[in-house]
Image (tube, helix red, strand yellow):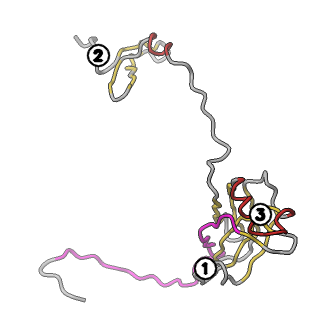
């Protein structure tokens, strides 16, 4: 009776390369059923692909190392049209731009950065590496349109990126803690 298989557990398939029996199961909508040729032939193959975009205006930035930043983004055509209208007459000659703000020690509100610099990118670009060169600092990235007059309209803003220090912490002291089993009532601090 050891060779009998319940319909709930599957069917045994002899694998000659391994020289042992393997159980093959198929799970279909929460039910475990043995595989059958009729079911596998009735379904057409599904062709799935990774989409080029998700239809969201967003930019994500992250620290690669203490000196470099990596950003990737997606900007939709309707968002670019809104930004062009926001630039007024200069919008027709505007280009896609990354603006990288130094927000070290600030609660950034869009106007209070220590400084910023711009990187002109093509519409087909989706990612960029930027050399920051300020270990231990914090930065924020915006993607938007910039006009010939120098005006900038934001489409999306990343979260804050905190860069690691370039060297280990200078504080080398070690605080040891001894853990003892608690006995008796808790004492207030």
Residue span colored magenta: 154-182
Residue beneath the point at 60% across and 73% down: 162
Which residue is the site of mark 2? 7
Q: Are marks 2 and 1 in contact (CB under 8 Å)?
A: no
Give the percent coordinates (x, y) of residue 122: 82, 56
Q: Is residue 35 left or right of residue 105?
A: left
| Secondary structure state at the residue bearing disc 2 | loop
> Within 10 angstroms of label 1, few (less than 14), some, or many (20 or more) residues?
some
> Within 10 angstroms of label 3, few (less than 14), some, or many (20 or more) residues?
many
Residue beneath the point at 69% across and 55% down: 78
Q: Which mark is residue 8?
A: none
Q: Which mark is first along the chain, 1 or 2?
A: 2
Please tell me whether the stretch drawn in magenta is mainly helix, strand or loop.
Answer: loop
Give the percent coordinates (x, y) of residue 62: 63, 64
Q: Nearer the viewer, residue 139 or 53?
A: 53
Question: What is the spatial separation of the Cα atoms under label 2 and label 1, in whole angstroms?
Answer: 62 Å
Q: Where does the C terminus fall, quadrant-wise?
A: bottom left
Residue beneath the point at 64% across and 57% down: 57
| Secondary structure state at the residue bearing disc 1 | loop
Q: Are marks 3 and 2 in contact (CB under 8 Å)?
A: no
Question: What is the spatial separation of the Cα atoms under label 1 and label 3, in whole angstroms?
Answer: 25 Å
Which residue is the site of mark 3? 84
Q: Nearer the viewer, residue 46 or 184?
A: 46
Q: Nearer the viewer, residue 94 or 142?
A: 94
Question: What is the spatial separation of the Cα atoms under label 3 and label 2, in whole angstroms?
Answer: 64 Å
Q: Is residue 30 above or below residue 137?
A: above
Which residue is the site of mark 1? 108
Give the percent coordinates (x, y) of residue 89: 84, 68
Give the percent coordinates (x, y) of residue 30: 33, 29
Residue beneath the point at 29% across and 16% down: 7
């Amino acid at each position: 009776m050891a060779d009998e298989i319940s319909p709930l557990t599957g069917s045994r398939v002899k694998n000659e390369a391994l020289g042992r029996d393997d159980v093959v199961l198929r799970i279909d909508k929460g039910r475990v059923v043995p595989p059958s040729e009729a079911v596998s032939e009735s379904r057409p193959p599904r062709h799935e692909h990774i989409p080029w975009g998700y239809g969201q205006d967003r930019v994500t930035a992250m620290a690669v190392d203490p000196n470099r930043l990596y950003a990737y983004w997606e900007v939709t055509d309707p968002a670019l049209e809104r930004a062009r209208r926001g630039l007024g007459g200069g919008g027709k000659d505007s280009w896609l731009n990354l603006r990288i703000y130094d927000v070290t020690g600030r609660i950034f509100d869009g106007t209070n950065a220590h400084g910023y610099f711009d990187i002109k990118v093509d519409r087909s670009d989706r990612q960029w590496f930027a050399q920051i060169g300020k270990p231990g600092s914090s930065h924020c990235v915006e993607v938007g349109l910039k006009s010939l007059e120098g005006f900038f309209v934001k489409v999306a803003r990343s979260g804050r990126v905190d860069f690691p220090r370039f060297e280990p912490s200078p504080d080398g002291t070690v605080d040891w803690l001894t853990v003892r089993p608690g006995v008796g009532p808790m004492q207030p601090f």
